[in-house]
Image (cartoon, rainbow, N blue to C red):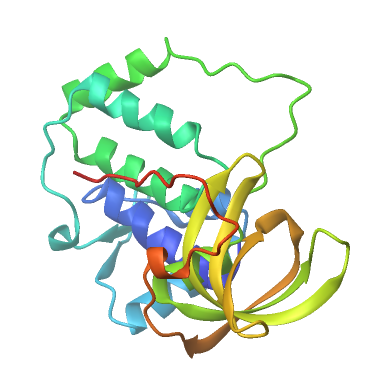
Amino acid sequence: MNRTDRLYAIVEELRAVSPRLRTARELARRHGVSVRTVERDISALQQSGVPIYADVGRRGGYALEKSMSLPPLNFTAAEAVALAVAVARAEDGPFAAAGRSALRKILAAMSRQNAAAARELAERVRILESPDAAAPMPIPPEVEQAVLARRVLRIEYLDRAGVLSAREVEPVALLHGSNGWYLLAWCRLRDEPRNFRLDRIKAIELTEWVGPERSIDMCRPEEAVHEVRMISLG
């Protein structure tokens, strides 16, 4: 995890448990860094305006201001576990880390009774995995950020013929198919839309350039003949 991701994760963890405290030692253990590094991270966040305060003493730690936390949520145990199952099954999907962060926030904002019931129910749910199955390939964070903010990517791509090429692409969407995840993007090298298999991207760099807004329907290449099923939030 790079420093930017770690700073974001620290804020999200403090938000999830607010108004309870997290010690520097607990944060260091969770993120695999030293206590001194966590203390420097907290200081940097405070200087940037994030309302984190420190409570000194033997049981002291860091907390996020209450106004930054979520109000109580009336999720049932089954609803929370349903979300947990979806998150667990999407480890190779886009924004998997964001899904885990959202789940922690939901549990922290549920009533103690419902959160305890959700944890008890989760103990009785298992996802079977084949020992021979290949480990899922996570989507690179650069791709997630590029799709989120329409940032141009500079990539090295190995095509189906085994030819490696350098390209600049304008991300439009993420697609899932029989061969895993694809990045639908406008290829500046070919000046037309292309589907890029993520496992064939051999090098990737997130640039500061923002590409124009393009619709998925306008940018689907001719070879993408399959139906596209939308993700619903409603």
Residue most extreme to the right: 162
- The vertical placement of 154 against 60, above or below, is below
**Quadrant (top left, top right, bottom left, bottom right) of the C terminus:** top left
Q: Nearer the viewer, residue 167 or 12?
A: 167
Q: State the residue at coordinates (42%, 44%).
A: 100
Residue most extreme to the top: 124
Q: State the residue at coordinates (28%, 81%).
A: 49
Res. 57 visible in picture: no
- The vertical placement of 191 against 62, above or below, is below
> Looking at the rendering, which quadrant does residue 75 occupy?
top left
Q: State the residue at coordinates (42%, 27%).
A: 85
Q: Nearer the viewer, residue 111 or 150?
A: 150
**Quadrant (top left, top right, bottom left, bottom right) of the N terminus:** bottom right
Instruction: Give the number of marks.
Output: 0
Could you tell me residue 93's position as x and y percent?
Answer: 52, 46
- The vertical placement of 167 against 197, above or below, is below
Res. 182 visible in picture: yes
On screen, residue 131 versus residue 207, left or right, reads right
On screen, residue 8 versus residue 138, left or right, reads left
Could you tell me residue 140's position as x and y percent?
Answer: 61, 60
Could you tell me residue 86's position as x and y percent?
Answer: 41, 32
Could you tell me residue 192's position as x and y percent?
Answer: 57, 78
Q: State the residue at coordinates (45%, 85%).
A: 211
Q: Nearer the viewer, residue 217 or 80?
A: 217
